[in-house]
Image (cartoon, rainbow, N blue to C red):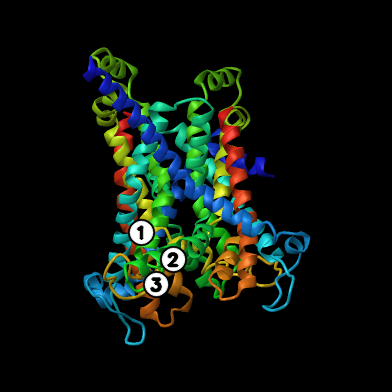
Amino acid sequence: MKRYLFRIIKSKIISVILTLIVILSTIPFLLVLYFIIKNGISVINWEFLTSLPKPVGEPGGGILNAIVGTAMLVIMALILSVPFGILVGVYLAERSEGRIAFFSRLVSEILQGVPSIVIGIIAYLWVVKPMGHFSALSGGVALGIMMLPLVIKSTEEILKLIPREIKEASLALGVPYYRTILKVIIPAGLSGILTGILTGVARIAGETAPLLFTAFGNPFLNFDILKPISAMPLLIFTYAVSPYEEWWAKAWGASCILVLFVLSLNIITRLLSRR
Amino acid sequence: MANQFIKKLGLSKDTLFNLILTISAVLLIILGVGFFLSLFNASLVSLKKFGLSFFAKAEWDPVQEEFGALPFIYGTLLTSFIALAISLPFSIAISIVLGEYFQKGFFAEVLRYLTELIAGVPSVVLGFWGLFFLVPIVREVEMKFEIPPYGVGILTASLILAFMILPYSGSIGKDAMRLVPNELKEAAYALGATRWEMIKKVMLPYARSGITAGIILSLGRALGETMAVTMVIGNYHGIPENIFSPGNTIASVIANEFTEATGEVYLSSLMYLGLTLFIITTVVNLIGRFILKKLQH
């Protein structure tokens, strides 16, 4: 009897210890969040969001160039990856067997695991080198390649979940195959595809490595996709490793905005996908 | 216009649609092959000059144009495996707690959110935080043990990496634990096992390959992680003597030197490093995914 009691108590104690370890593992995350908000929130004001950086020593200035840059890069990545990714995803969901499906799925899986810095090298080789200079376009290409596997995978997975009866009903009513896919199947899976796209945006918005030698950074406002452009993560990196205290403060402010943006995107996708 | 063109070709819209789908899938394959070939082609100058001795040489000298990747490969493997060792107990605890103790309910949701949101914090922000929070702490520790107090180095990078890969191994491990059939768990209870005994003797062995796959996939992440590591590893070109020494990983060298690289051999050697990293991470990832796929069948 005593022996049995001992085993039960041991089981309980272990469960408490394990739960404590899990809680402990979330502490660094809370620390990061606390640090960023504490140091960042006081920097953020209207001027910070709407003006360009000023030289070191001059008070004021903001990060408008980086905000515009990140927005442009994300839009370019979306244009490059979403239509293409959905088409490939539809192909994989419709013809999951076969050699073409096997190899494109393999490429998509490999791309998903490729370190972002290597994707940066590819964008450098494919866009920067032929053009002869850094550009926003090359950054968009790099981020687009990063997003592609996420769009493909979420499209394929959600379309496979849609009941066959829906598709068959549409075909039985005499709707051509292409219209069935475009007007019935894809709308039915739209929320899943959107979730994939939002996850992708959350991932690429904070990416720095592939932009180092593609978008490169730019202290001025730029809307030309053929010229170098700044981005939030690039600005944080440049400011963080600089020796100036006022730039550190700016980097905390930018980190705060970026983290809140990315985290709220993540939370929105979680809420969307739970439905 | 378009309609007439299609009619002239004698294609129905369905055939055309199928054609577009197939072309997209084939384009993706071409993209993948092109990816590898471009990287390989760009590495060719360095590949021809150094061959496989690139991986055995410890010097990295742009002036003499002598390049060897040994210190960086060593740094990459060292930081990744230390990170794996640090995160292992935590990731197994997450698998057990979220896969068995708390499967539903408010507490489970909060814990899951917290452990998974870490994956959303941009790597550059973690590196920045590491620079201002972790580095001073490591420096204090080093002063106590009378080691040169750099603060930055292999250990600091490994700590941040461990923290970054935790959500991946944790969430895959958790899924694997939840796949354990209820019949097996109930059988263990019926035989008189306590909850912990059931977890240890039934769930962990059953979920072992899933947990392993999660660990392998998180290793793939750690090997290629760039920004956070670049900011706290110290960027030292020699072979690190101990875990407190500054070092460099393949990814951090590329990030630091790519835009400054002058000369064909120098740039090509950086590409060669990129090719190496690409091959290592791809192999590691495909092994992890292969294990996961075998589980699902």
Q: Nearer the viewer, residue A65 or B10?
A: A65
Same chain check for tags 2 and 3: yes
- Looking at the image, is mark 2 or mark 3 nearer the viewer? 3
Q: Secondary structure at mark 2?
A: helix
Q: Point out the image quarter for the C terminus of chain A.
A: top right
Disc marking residue B150: 3
Farthest residue, direction front: A2
- Looking at the image, is mark 1 or mark 3 nearer the viewer? 3
Label 1 to label 3: alpha-carbon separation: 30 Å
Q: Nearer the viewer, residue B115 or B68?
A: B115
Label 2 to label 3: alpha-carbon separation: 10 Å
Residue at 57% in and 31% down: A189
- Tell me if A207 is positioned left or right of B282 in this view: right
Label 2 to label 1: alpha-carbon separation: 22 Å
Q: Nearer the viewer, residue A219 or B99?
A: B99
Residue B282 to residue A7: above or below = below
Q: Position of residue A205 (x, y in %)?
A: 58, 54
Name the chain under label 3.
B
Residue at 24% in and 69% down: B55
- Tell me if B100 is positioned left or right of A51 in this view: left
Residue type pointed to by label 2:
Val
Quarter occupied by residue A246: bottom right
Report the residue marked by disc 2.
B232
Name the chain under label 2.
B
Mark 2 / mark 1, whichever is N-terminal:
2
Residue type pointed to by label 3:
Tyr
Residue type pointed to by label 1:
Phe
Q: Position of residue B240 (x, y in %)?
A: 29, 70
Q: Are marks 2 and 3 in contact (CB under 8 Å)?
A: no
Q: Secondary structure at mark 3?
A: loop
Disc marking residue B278: 1
